[in-house]
Each structure stands twice: as structure tokens, then as C-alpha cells.
Image (tube, rainbow, N blue to C red):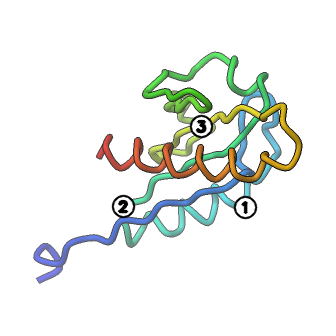
Amino acid sequence: MDQLVKKRRVLFISPWYPSRVYPSLGPFVREHAKAAARFAEVQVVHLTSDRRIREAEGQQLVDRGRYWELYEELDCRLSAGLKTYRLWHRRPGIPLTGYLSYLWAVLQGVLAVRHQG
């Protein structure tokens, strides 16, 4: 009977998640996602504007737009076996437009993750 029930799909979107640059940033998000993965198909999107995270090794470019880039995390120690993406977004040079740029990057990145499957 359990095989007939389709697992729910859950997407965690967070600016806090462990990376090579900040390994202790947001381990609680990763642990929460691991717990949810017992009952659902889980993917994680880590939002960042930090160039050091964008340029770190162990990631593969998946998609990009004018103001954002989506990378898949390849290091299993950081992703803990979860499908994990890093969504880097550019900070705009125009004051008061940062939040709109951030929302646009999130929307485009989530659509790209959805397209990945």
C-alpha cells in the first residue's frame, strides 16, 4: 500500500546553509531537511550573494541568468545526501532595488530547480 502513495516534494529555500566558506552556517536547516527527507523528496536552495561561495570548488554550474547563477553542490559532506543547489544573486548598484533583485533571483532560481526535476 505504501508503494502506491507518491512522496511529497519539498523545497527548502534558505540564506543559511553550510558551505566550504562557512561550514557552520545553518546546520539546523540541513538537519531539518534531512529529517523531512524521511517522508518526502527534498531539495535545498541556498541563497547567497557572497562571491567566495560562488567561486568555491565542488560545485557545478546548472543554469544562469543576467543577475543570478545556480550551482549544484557536489560535496556529499555539505549536502548530506540531499539534492542541494547554491543560488548566487548579484547585488544591484542602485539603492533600494536590492530586495526586488533578490526576489527576481529567487523566482528564476526556483524555476530552474523545478526544471531540473
Label disc, if present, on residue 86 of the rendered structure: 3
Marks 1 and 3 sit apart, C-alpha to C-alpha, by 17 Å
What percent of the width, then of the height, locates residue 62? 43, 27
Residue count near mark 3 (Cα–Cα under 10 Å), binned few <14, some 14–19, many ≥20: many
Residue 42 is left or right of residue 49, and the answer is left
Label 2: few (<14), some or many (≥20) within 10 Å? some
Closer to the eye: label 2 or 3: 3
Q: Which residue is mark 2?
A: 41
Q: Quadrant of the N terminus?
A: bottom left
Cα gap from disc 2 to disc 1, whole angstroms: 18 Å
Examine the rendered structure and indicate whether residue 5 appears above or below residue 74. Answer: below
Residue lying at 78% horizontally and 35% vertically, measured from the top left: 91
Q: Tell me the quarter of the picture where residue 51 sits.
A: top right
Q: Residue at x 27, y 70 (%)?
A: 7
Asked which secondary structure carries label 2, the reply is strand
Q: Give whichever of discs 2 and 3 has the lower sequence position.
A: 2
